[in-house]
Amino acid sequence: MPTEPAVLIAAAALLGLVVGSFLNVVIHRLPRMLEREWRAQCEELAGREPVAEPAYNLLVPRSHCPACKTPVQTLHLIPIVGWLLTRGRCAACGVAVSPRYPIVEALTAVLFALAALKFGFGWPLAGALLLIAMLVALAFIDLDTQFLPDQLTLPLLWAGLAMSLFFGPAGDGGAGIGGAGDLPPALADAVLGAIAGYLVLWTVHQAFRLATGKEGMGYGDFKLLAALGAWLGWQALLPIVLIASVTGAAVGVALIVGRGRSREHPIPFGPFLAVAGWIVLMWGDALLPAALRGFGG
Ligand SMILES: [Zn+2]
């Protein structure tokens, strides 16, 4: 494997393009797969025969145009290049293909390259790439559907705890400011991060609901913050919640003022948690000690 920084960064960017291409499939198909599953369960509960539907998962059917159903040619499946070759249109029927596809691919490639630059070659980089890929998928699924699937948040949480168990530094019981920003964090910091991450947002949610009678957040948000706590340690939670809330409020106000968007129309919180988690992943070692000092830790 490459250890030369430039080679490693280029390899990470290439891997990011391929992973980004797969994430496009996950972002598009996972919500539809879950919807089918729920519909089948409802039929079963109602005592009706489930309707036989053609196979639909992350691999089957192969990528096709949503308008004319023509399978996408192998050449046009190449990340970014395929979209440019077809000038963003279906090669068969000419219907426009969303620029979201090459954007997700390019974004994943850039995020992977930045992670390679920061972490260098090793287990922390492997963990960072997994975390980044999951955050990209979760952010876009939440934007599309206002929903963070357990099928992604819960494995991400377990993976974070496993990273700390197998590759984390031998913990000092979880008190250490010095260890803040380590990837993976000490096991005690990760477990505490997972528990506190869930409880913090759950508490805010219950208080908000008692005060306003409205649902401000979904349970997926609690699980995502629990997963980020598992990956980044409890020390990361306060900066993540602060960054996500401030940027979320700023974007929310901008949308209401700029586009006349209704105050009642919910803005998903998951993408802001994902971005905040990424910021702490990349710059937590600089941010965290300052944040902990600032809040009397
Ligand atoms: Zn077509």
Image (cartoon, helix red, strand yellow):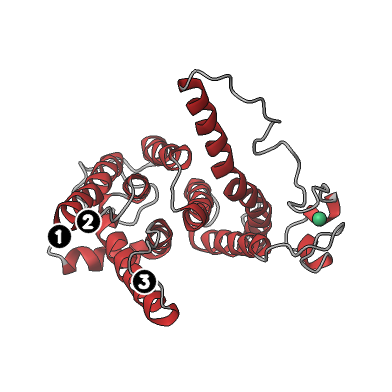
Image coordinates of residue 225 in percent, x first then y, are 33, 50
Q: Earlier in the sequence, mark 3 or mark 2?
A: 2
Viewer-proximal residue among 196 and 42? 42
Circles 1 and 2 in contact, beta carbons < 8 Å: yes
Dot 1 or dot 2: first in sequence order is 2
Q: Amino acid at mark 1?
A: Gly
Q: Residue 230: in sight, yes or no? A: no
Q: Is residue 287 left or right of residue 116?
A: left
The residue that label 3 is drawn on is 252
Amino acid under disc 2 = Ile
Compared with 212, 219 (above or below) is above
2 shown above or below 35: below
Q: Quadrant location of residue 91?
A: bottom right
Which residue does the numbered mark 2 point to in the structure image? Answer: 177
Q: Which residue is mark 1?
A: 297
Crowding around mark 3 (Cα neighbors within 10 Å: few <14, some 14 to 19, many 20+) is some
In this rendering, position of residue 213 left or right of residue 55: left
Q: Measuring 67% from the left and 35% from the top, which residue is drawn there?
A: 56
Element assignment for label 2: loop
**Amino acid under label 3?**
Gly
Q: Nearer the viewer, residue 205 or 11?
A: 205
3D distance between C-alphas at marks 3 and 1:
31 Å
Q: Nearer the viewer, mark 3 or mark 1?
A: 3
- Image coords of residue 38 (percent x, y): 50, 32
Tell me the quadrant of ligand 1. bottom right
Give the SS element for disc 3. Answer: helix
The residue under the point 48% across, 28% down is: 42
